[in-house]
Image: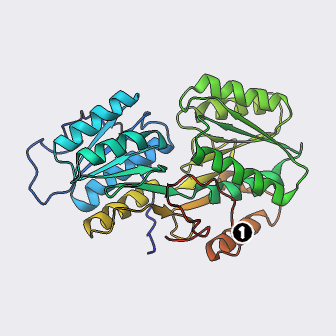
């Protein structure tokens, strides 16, 4: 199935709805045939990345399918359980739990509320009504690694992540493989701060890598990505030629003076397609994969900095993208999904 790609929302609006109220509408009881869709995030949807894309996806489901929607930010496992209980007890049909951290609570809730379908972004556990939505972001980060390996002048690049969960580690494994596909002698630095949203910790990690000579840094963070971009900007202000790479959404506009490109997940479109599949009765019992082949994953150069790219780099990345799409180039990945029988990279399982 090919997933259409629409233009991403230009901004992010924070939904302040509580668990039992919709983000839009008058709060009246929905008609029985109205889809009720909910979203759980463990961080703020103002992060211009992972959480923002999920919230935009919820709004896209509301606009495109006429759904009643609700969002809640939950910070702890106890809050995960409480939110699932509230949504399940209220009869919500489709609950997006946006992050690997929700998978255990999702399995418990799925058993308690068999009429609800729970979709866990980046999850690894499967049940009849609990479905991992697996973004093959490693395909985009591999392309980002090729770009970083070409752009580095120091021969040192850096990676700053939040929590070292399998999906995050997988993006860094693929990024390093992309770097080494260009030049196996490049040094690749890696730091996990242990927190997705701690801006200060992310900045400190980026500063440490810059002090070791890194001149291109990618992140796999949420709100903390702003700390990486700030560190790179300050290094540029001090006269260094360094660049950053965004991740999870097209972050090129967040710091257009230093971000050379972004490894992108088109999360809103993936959410909408998942909701459509659910309406057709095609969601349940097995993971959903989203990759370059479906148009959900990509690496996007910052148009404002195209002039500083080496000749031929854009075409080289385009060729590699085509090879991933066709299956000719298989990107290394970290397997973490129950029952994953190693579907081919770029596949549309």
Q: Position of residue 171 (x, y in %)?
A: 64, 50
Q: Observer-nearest residue: 252 or 228? A: 228
Total marks drawn? 1
- Are there few (<14), some (14-19), or many (20+) residues within 10 Å of tag 1? some
Q: Observer-nearest residue: 35 or 314? A: 35
> Residue 51, relative to residue 127: is it above or below?
above
Q: Quadrant of residue 253?
A: top right
User: Is residue 160 at all visible to an observer of this figure?
Assistant: yes
The residue tagged 1 is: 320
Residue occupying the point 43% across, 63% down:
6
Q: Quadrant of residue 317?
A: bottom right
Report whether 235 appears left or right of 77.
Answer: right
Residue occupying the point 72% across, 69% down:
320
Q: Position of residue 197 (x, y in %)?
A: 53, 30
Give the quarter of the figure containing the N terminus: bottom left
Q: Observer-nearest residue: 287 or 292? A: 287
Q: Observer-nearest residue: 91 or 53? A: 91
User: Is residue 252 at all visible to an observer of this figure?
Assistant: no
Q: Position of residue 219 (x, y in %)?
A: 65, 41
- Name the element at disc 1: helix
> Residue 30, relative to residue 220: is it above or below?
below
Residue occupying the point 51% across, 69% down:
294
């Amino acid at each position: 199935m090919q997933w259409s790609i629409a233009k991403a929302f230009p901004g992010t609006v924070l939904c302040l709805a509580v668990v039992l109220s919709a983000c839009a509408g008058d709060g009246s009881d929905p008609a029985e045939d109205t889809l009720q869709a909910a979203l759980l995030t463990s961080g703020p949807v103002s992060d211009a990345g992972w959480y923002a894309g999920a919230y935009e996806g919820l709004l896209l489901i509301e606009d495109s399918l006429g759904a009643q929607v609700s969002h809640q930010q939950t910070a702890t496992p106890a809050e995960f359980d409480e939110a699932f209980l509230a949504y399940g007890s209220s009869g919500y049909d489709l609950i997006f739990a946006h992050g690997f951290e929700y998978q255990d609570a999702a399995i418990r809730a799925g058993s308690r509320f068999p009429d609800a379908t729970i979709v866990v972004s980046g999850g690894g556990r499967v049940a009849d009504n609990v479905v991992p939505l697996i973004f093959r972001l490693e395909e985009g980060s591999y392309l980002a690694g090729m770009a970083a390996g070409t752009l580095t002048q120091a021969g040192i690049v850096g990676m700053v992540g939040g929590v070292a969960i399998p999906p995050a580690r997988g993006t860094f494994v693929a990024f390093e493989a992309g770097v080494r596909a260009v030049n196996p002698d490049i040094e690749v630095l890696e730091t996990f701060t242990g927190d997705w949203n701690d801006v200060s910790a992310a900045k400190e990690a980026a500063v440490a890598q810059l002090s070791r000579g890194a001149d291109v840094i990618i992140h796999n963070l949420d709100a903390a990505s702003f700390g990486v971009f700030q560190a790179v900007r300050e290094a540029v202000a001090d006269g260094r030629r360094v660049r950053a790479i965004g991740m999870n959404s097209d972050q090129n506009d967040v710091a257009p003076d230093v971000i050379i490109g972004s490894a992108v997940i088109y999360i809103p479109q993936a959410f909408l397609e998942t909701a459509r599949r659910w309406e057709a009765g095609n969601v349940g019992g097995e993971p959903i994969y989203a990759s370059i082949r479906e148009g959900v994953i990509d690496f996007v150069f910052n148009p404002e900095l195209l002039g500083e790219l080496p000749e031929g780099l854009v075409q080289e990345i385009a060729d590699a993208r085509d090879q991933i799409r066709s299956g000719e180039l298989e990107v290394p990945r970290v397997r973490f999904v129950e029952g994953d029988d190693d579907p081919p990279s770029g596949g549309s399982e």
